[in-house]
Amino acid sequence: MSKITWGSSAGKGRGVFAAIDFVPGETVETAPVILIDAADVPNEGVRDRYLFDWGDGRCAIGLGYLSLYNHSDSPNVLWEQHSDALTISMIAVRRIERGEELLFDYKCPEITKAFTA
């Protein structure tokens, strides 16, 4: 059974949803990324909304469900970059109930494992 699924998100198009309950600090998803030069994506809106800043002049295209997560100023997941593995993990920052949409703050840089209870 998959831990997450995608579906329709009211007013946002598609979104990612919890298929099980998650506890703070639990990995929701780890997915591979494709790196591209940020200069190859001149539209800042595209970079800000659909790509992850890799921090070295490159952006990451998220595979798996990564590109379907929606924004929230009160996120329930944060992302963690794994440079050597070329992956990103989504990590629960609070208890998440089955069926709840998984949301992260698009303006927030990667996390350093600072979780809330």
Image (spheres, grey):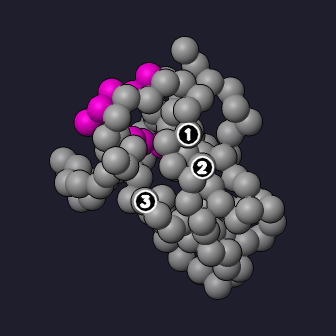
Please name the residue that numbered disc 1 is placed on.
Answer: 27
Please name the residue that numbered disc 2 is placed on.
Answer: 89
Q: What's under tag 2, amino acid-wise?
A: Ser
Q: Is residue 44 visible from the viewing direction of this image?
A: no
Instruction: Name the residue located 54 percent from the left edge and 66 percent from the top edge.
Output: 62
Q: Quadrant of the C terminus?
A: top right
**Image: magenta residue range:** 95-104
Residue 105 to residue 88: above or below:
above
Q: What's under tag 3, amino acid-wise?
A: Tyr
Q: Position of residue 9 (x, y in %)?
A: 23, 50
* Residue 20 quadrant: top left
Mark 3 and 1 residues: CB-CB less than 8 Å, in contact? no
Q: Nearer the viewer, mark 3 or mark 1?
A: 1
Mark 2 and 1 residues: CB-CB less than 8 Å, in contact? yes
* Residue 56 quadrant: bottom right
Horizontal side of 76 relative to 16 (left or right) equals right
Return the disc, 2 or 3, that comes first in the chain's sequence.
Answer: 3
Q: Which residue is situated farthest in the bottom direction here?
A: 40
At mark 2, the secondary structure is: strand
Q: Is residue 2 visible from the viewing direction of this image?
A: yes
Nearer to me, 71 or 21? 21
Please name the residue that numbered disc 3 is placed on.
Answer: 65
Q: Position of residue 86 (x, y in %)?
A: 70, 65
Q: What's under tag 1, amino acid-wise?
A: Thr
Instruction: Name the residue located 55 percent from the left edge and 45 percent from the top edge.
Output: 90
Horizontal side of 28 relative to 39 (left or right) equals left
Horizontal side of 40 relative to 46 (left or right) equals right
Nearer to me, 98 or 45? 98
Horizontal side of 35 relative to 74 (left or right) equals right
Secondary structure predominantly adopted by residues drawn in magenta:
loop
Distance Cα–Cα, label 2 vs label 3: 11 Å
103 within the magenta span: yes
